[in-house]
Amino acid sequence: MQLWSEQLRCNLRDLLTQKLAGQVEKGSLAGRLFLPILLSGTFVQLFSVTVMQVAIVDIQRGLGAGAGQTDLVLAGYTLTYACSLIVSARLGDRYGYRRMFVTGMALFILASIGAAAAPNAWLLLSGRLAQGLGSGLMAPQILSLIQSALPAHRRPAALSAFGATMAVASMAGPVLGGVLMQLDPLGLGWRAAMLLAVPIGVGALLLSPALPPVRPSRAAERIDAVGATLSLTGLVLLVAPLTVGRDAGWPPWTWVSFATAVVLLIAFVASQRRVAEPLVHPATLACPATRWGLTVVFVFNAGVPSFTMLLSMHLQGAQGWTPLEYGLSIVPYAIGSLAGSAAATALSARFGPWVLIASAFLMGLSVIVVAVAIDRAELLGLYLLALGLSGVGFGLFAASAFTQVISRVRPELATSVSGLLPMAQQLGGTFGVTFAGVAYSAAGPDGAFWNAMTYEAVAFTLAAATAVTLVRFRSRSDQAGLAATAQLTRATHR
C-alpha cells in the first residue's frame, strides 16, 4: 500500500511539474490524459446545445417563460459562442492555449451552476450567455493544442476523435436529458440536465496541469483592438436578428442589423491586411481549399442542428411525446453516429473529400425517408433505418471534416483556422435553425414537418455539391501524404 501511494505521489508530481517542449509523449501520463481533457471541453460545449432541445418545454412550465424568452435561452448560448471564437483564438496565442482553455472551462462551469439555479428566465438567459462565452474561449484552444502539441502522424486520429466527440455529445444531450427529466432526481427537473456537464468540466480542470503549456514560437505581443471590435460587433449584429427575428416578425431593426453587420465584417477583413498582428492571417482565406472547406462545414451544419431540433419540435410538440420518449426515439441516430465516427479515420484517409460528399448525400436522402415514415406506424422499421443511416452520415462528416480542412493548412495559419472552423460550424447551425423554422412555419400543421425536411434535404445536397470542389484540391501528393499519415497512425496505435 505504501509503495502504491508513493508511486501515485510520484506520478502526480511528474504530472504537475512536467515541462513539455511543444509535444506530448504518447506513453507518458500527460500523453494519456491529453485528449480526454481536451475532448471533455468539446463534449460539454455541444452537450449544452442539444440538451436544451428536450428541456425547453419544462423550462417554459417551470419558469413561466414566454416563447420569446425561451427562444433567447436557446439562441443566447450560440450568440456568445460563435461571436467570440475569432478573438479567443488570438487570445490563445497571446496568453497560452492551456491558460485560455482553463479560463473558458472555469467560466463555463460557474455559468452552468448559475443557469441551473436561475429563478427566472432572464437570469437563465444570463447564464446561457456566459456559458457560450466560456465555450467560445475553449473551442479554438482545443484545435490549437492538437495542432501544436501532437506530432503530425498522431493528428489525424486526434481530429477524428474530436469529430467523434462532437457526434456523441450531440446525441447524448437529448438521450441523457430525457432520462434525467423523466427520473426527476431531487425534483430538479431540467436543472439536473443543466448540471450534468458540471462534473465533466470539474474533472477537466483538476487534470488540466497535464496539458502542455505550449504557445506559438512567436507569441502575439498584442491583440488587434480594432479588428476585435469590428469582428465582435459585426458577428453580434449578424447573429442576433437570426436568433430572434423570425419570432418577432422580422421588424425593420433586424434588416438594419444585417446591413450594418455586412459593412463591419467587410471592414474587418480589410483591416486584417493592414495590421502587424491580425486576428485572422490574411493568407488564410487566400487558400481555395481552406475557403471551400469552411464553406462545406458551414453548409452542412445549416442542416444538422436544425434536423434534431425539428424532430424534437414535431415529436414533443405536435405528437405530445415526453422528453424521455423523444430521447429514446433517436437512439438509432446516436448508434449510427458512433458507427460513422469509428469508420471515419480509415475512410477519410483513403477517399478524402469523397467521404464528405457521401455523408452529406446520405443525410439528404435519409431525411426525406424520415419525413415519409415518421407518422406511419407500418413504416416504423423504415423510419428507424433512415434515422440510423442519417446518424452514420453525421458521424462520418463530423469525424472527418475538420481533418480534411486542417490537414492542408500551413502551421502559421493554424490559429486562424482554429477559430474559423468552429465559427463556421456555429454560424451554419444558427442560419439553419432560422431557415428550418421558417420552412416549418410556412406550411399548415399537416405539412410543416414535410416542409422542414425538404429544407434539410436541400441543405445537405448543397453541402455535398460544395464538397465536390474539395476534390479538385486533393492532388496525388495529398493522397499519398494522407495515406502515409494513416499508416503511421495505425502503426502507432498497435
Image (cartoon, rainbow, N blue to C red):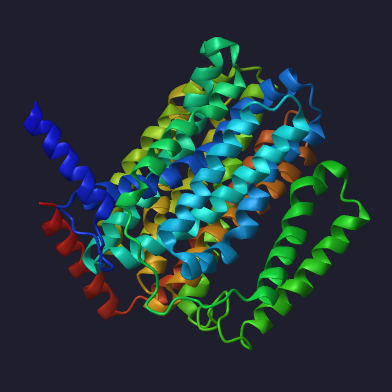
Q: In front here: 75 or 466?
A: 75
Residue found farthest to the left: 3
Relative to residue 403, is residue 34 depicted above or below? above
How many numbered circles does the render carry?
Answer: 0
Residue 403, image x, y percentages: 36, 62
- Residue located 50% across and 62% down the image: 421
Taking 488 as reference, is 163 above or below it?
Answer: above
In this rendering, would 324 be left or right of 472? right
Q: Is residue 322 visible?
A: yes
Which residue is depicted at the point 74% across and 34% down?
Answer: 123
Tell whether 363 sits left or right of 264: left
Left or right: residue 185 versus residue 245 is: left
The quarter of the picture where residue 184 lies is top right
What is the quadrant of the N terminus in the image?
Answer: top left
The image shows residue 457 at horizontal and vertical percentages of: 57, 48
Q: Is residue 357 visible?
A: no
Residue 318 pos. (x, y %): 69, 23
Vertical arrangement, residue 411 with respect to residue 46, above or below: below
Asked if residue 479 is positioned above or below residue 490 in the image, the reply reads below
| Image quadrant where residue 7 sits | top left
Residue occupying the point 80% across, 63% down: 258
